[in-house]
Amino acid sequence: MGFSMQPYGIQAMLKEGHKHLSGLDEAVLKNIDACKQLSTITRTSLGPNGMNKMVINHLDKLFVTNDAATIVNELEVQHPAAKILVLAGKAQQEEIGDGANLTISFAGELLQNAEELIRMGLHPSEIISGYSKGINKTIEILDELVEKGSETMDVRNKEQVISRMKAAVASKQFGQEDILSNLIADACMQVCPKNPANFNVDNVRVAKLVGGGLHDCTIVRGMVLKSDAVGTIKRVEKAKVAVFAGGVDTSATETKGTVLIHSAEQLENYAKTEEAKVEELIKAVADSGAKIIVSGAAVGEMALHFCERYKLMVLKISSKFELRRFCRTTGAVALLKLSQPNTDDLGYVDSISVEEIGGVRVTIVKNEEGGNSVCTVVLRGSTDSILDDLERAVDDGVNNYKAMCRDSRIIPGAAATEIELARRLKEFSFKETGLDQYAIAKFAESFEMVPKTLAENAGLNAMEIISSLYAEHASGNTKVGIDLDEGVCKDMSNLNIWDLYVTKFFALKYAADAACTVLRVDQIIMAKPAGGPKRDPPAGMDED
């Protein structure tokens, strides 16, 4: 016993099995290293020529995508510092819905430059104060770069919408952005309410059907359900709809009842009364003027028989989210149990038909007159992963539309803005005295990551391009960016490549915040992980 080491210092204070990392080498540089790894993953996916990543998550689901938000969501990032970057990317995705890649890559670049400064002997707090000055100055310069006259915009003018949306869609589906932006703009304008600030992203749905190609994509005003109608009636036009959330079936009584049957006649009559009861309920629905019954749960055999007899079309929508959207499309009110609906509770559709698209039976619910309720983009493509990627591009476009409804200011795209920011911040850093001027200079250098990455992903010579961009910007052409097709620098206002101001604003802000948060850490203390089997997080909503 006498020889056993008594723990001392921090070991004596904490429970055994903990980890304690402190100091520059162990904590700060390790954190920076983890964040650099994460941003190296997302960086190659930045921009229109970005490469795809193949991610297989813990449930064996395969993702092939260049959408950074999806990539970092599906990678189970374990390192606490890299998690901060993931959260910054998620915040950007929720705020704007696009630009998560810029956030993560830029934060990683800032941290990489901070590492060089630390090795030069700067203290992290000086770097943080320099970065804070840098981001404040950046936001000032961003305001000056906003294109004149872009503050006002008609969100129902298709050309203006497409010019703002194209860049976001192109970064996901390069070469197909014209077709896609056209579709997305149409869909968004159809569901845009009178006050555009209230635009709801959920009103633009996506239906993915395998087969065909991109040119077969269409827009349906209304909904596309991926299921067949129950029963034989497949097409109804200009009809009223009754929606029952609880299912169309004979329901058991609440209390347990015992029925004593003495003779054969009683048994026959007992079965008949059940039939009569169901028929009475279905007849009540038919009498109310409804031609279509939509059920949220199972449809009983007997109920179906009577629905056929009264020429009612029966649909079954098992997802309650879809059922809510269906109610929103048709203006119906979902009733809890099978009973005679009031006329106010009935919805209306122009046509419901079951069609076959690419071997899949789908029910198309059209509602043209209903105004701006729900609109569905039907995507066609050869494989599931292509469809998923198309869906993400549509998602980005729709989110972009929402962002431009709130703030329609635009700035030049294709790295023109970033080079201008880098140039102006460089000048600003020379005016600063004190050690944070080095940090501001590094902050300015970090912006070069964007043109450099765009050029590298397109297989161009990054150094040449950056120097020629600087030369153009120094002579006062602030809108010159990279034309990736020809690999030369051009004026972006002629090519019509614009980025939304809000996207850039939030992406840079979140990135700087995340970088500063990581730099502020100087010790990591990890408790021993709790024993016991790993619990999966509870199953969430359906995929929407």
Image (spheres, helix red, strand yellow):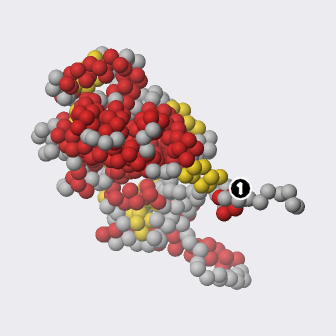
Q: Is residue 528 above or below residue 124?
A: below
Residue 531 is left or right of residue 136, and the answer is: right
Judge from the rendering whether residue 421 lies leftward or rightward of residue 23; answer left or right: left
- The structure residue drawn at horizontal position 52% and vertical position 41%, both measured from the top left corner, is 29
The part of the image, by quadrant, that contains residue 439 is top left
Is residue 91 visible in this depiction of the protein?
yes
Q: Position of residue 159 (x, y in %)?
A: 19, 35
Q: Position of residue 251 (x, y in %)?
A: 56, 72
Residue beneath the point at 23% across and 38% down: 431
Instruction: Give above or below for 498 relative to 124.
Output: above
Can residue 218 be seen here? The reply is: no
Residue under the image location 67 percent in, 59 percent down: 9
Of 192 and 114, nearer the camera is 114
- Residue 254, given in percent of the width and then of the height, sits at 58, 80
Q: How many marks?
A: 1
Residue type at tag 1: Gly
* Left/right of residue 480 with respect to residue 523 in the rendered view: left
* Element type at mark 1: loop
Mark 1, residue position: 17
Quadrant of the image occupied by residue 336: bottom left
- Residue at x 83% of width, y 57% of height: 4
Q: Quadrant of the N terminus?
A: bottom right
Residue sitting at the far left: 149
Find residue 265 and report its horizontal and vertical position in percent: 66, 78
- Mark 1: give few (<14), some (14-19) or many (20+) Cα within 10 Å: few
- Relative height, residue 67 to residue 370 (above, below): above
